[in-house]
Image (tube, grey):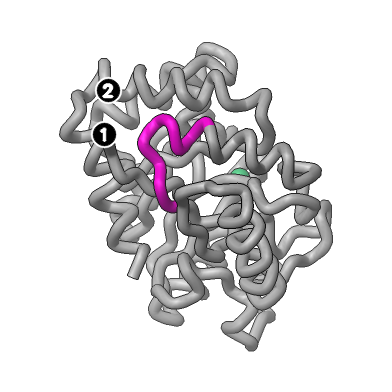
Amino acid sequence: MMNRIDVHNHFLPGMDDGCVGLDDSFACIQAMVQHGYDRFFLTPHTGCTEYGDVTPQQTRRAVEVFQREMDRRGVAAQFRPGGELRLSPQLLRWDDMDRIPTYGLNTAYCLADSWEPDWPHWADEAIDFLQGRGLTVILAHPERMDAIRANPALIETLADRGVLFQGNLGPLGGSEPEPIRALAEQFLTRGLYFMLGSDCHRPDHLPTRLAGLERAVELVGRTQVCTLTQTNPAKLWV
Ligand SMILES: [Fe+2]
């Protein structure tokens, strides 16, 4: 039995475009528990307009309720709050660091995403802003970002600035078109990922995520997948 930690998912029901109810969450988590996961950071979208602006404090309260519900259903797993912070120009005006969702809300690691087709100057400024406040920025699913597919050297530039990368299991398991799958495999085999996450939103995402876990083992071996799903995520679970 493994002790994997999922570092990116949308299992908290009703918070964003993820699970719509507890039954969906339960189905997702049960399947992942059967594949060696026993700890989950719950990472709703934060700081973006599409889903309302969930604060870390709201996430913390929701995770407490969620843990009790999963305990009641007999799930052998632990849950902690986090968030997926959208990089934006607005971020640069935040003066309240309590709005930044760090892993566990007790570490200096912050998961961030961007869907900009290019890499605007304010994205660099947002990273400077976060790093200037002592945070290590972990960029979610670089393989899915148009800006990185258009300019593959961007990932090196970001790595040189101390940004870490979280790869998604889905593309490795066939959830995305071929160019994204190929880039995910390339980043994985080049050792660019600090960790792998499911980014699972609902039960119909499970097959590709679980296939991605197997594919990762085929590509880089069990020891490296253990580093990406256990050892490195455990640095955030403190
Ligand atoms: Fe996500």
Q: Residue at x 59, y 61 (%)?
A: 67
Q: Quadrant of ligand 1?
A: top right
Task: Say whether residue 134 is left or right of residue 207.
Answer: left
Q: Residue at x 23, y 43 (%)?
A: 227
Q: Quadrant of the N terminus?
A: top left
- Determine if the magenta segment contains residue 34: yes
Amino acid bearing label 1? Val
- In the picture of the structure, the residue carrying the numbered disc 1 is 225
Please tell me which residue lies in front, 189 or 129. 189
Q: Residue at x 63, y 87 (%)?
A: 96
Amino acid bearing label 2? Val
Please tell me which residue lies in front, 63 or 197. 63
Whether 143 is drawn above or below 217: the answer is below
Classed neighbour count for the residue bearing mark 1: other residues with Cα under 10 Å, few (<14), some (14–19), many (≥20): many
Per the model, the C-alpha gap separating discs 1 and 2 is: 6 Å
Please tell me which residue lies in front, 49 or 154. 49
Tell me where residue 182 appears, x and y as whole percent: 42, 17
Q: Kindly check if marks 1 and 2 are in contact, taking CB atoms under 8 A apart as contact.
A: yes
Q: Quadrant of the C terminus?
A: bottom left
Please tell me which residue lies in front, 66 or 19. 66
Tell me where residue 179 appears, x and y as whole percent: 51, 16
Label for residue 217?
2
Task: Say whether residue 189 is left or right of residue 74.
Answer: left
**Element carrying mark 1:** helix
Please report the bounds of the magenta region as a residue range.
31-39
Tell me where residue 181 appears, x and y as whole percent: 47, 19
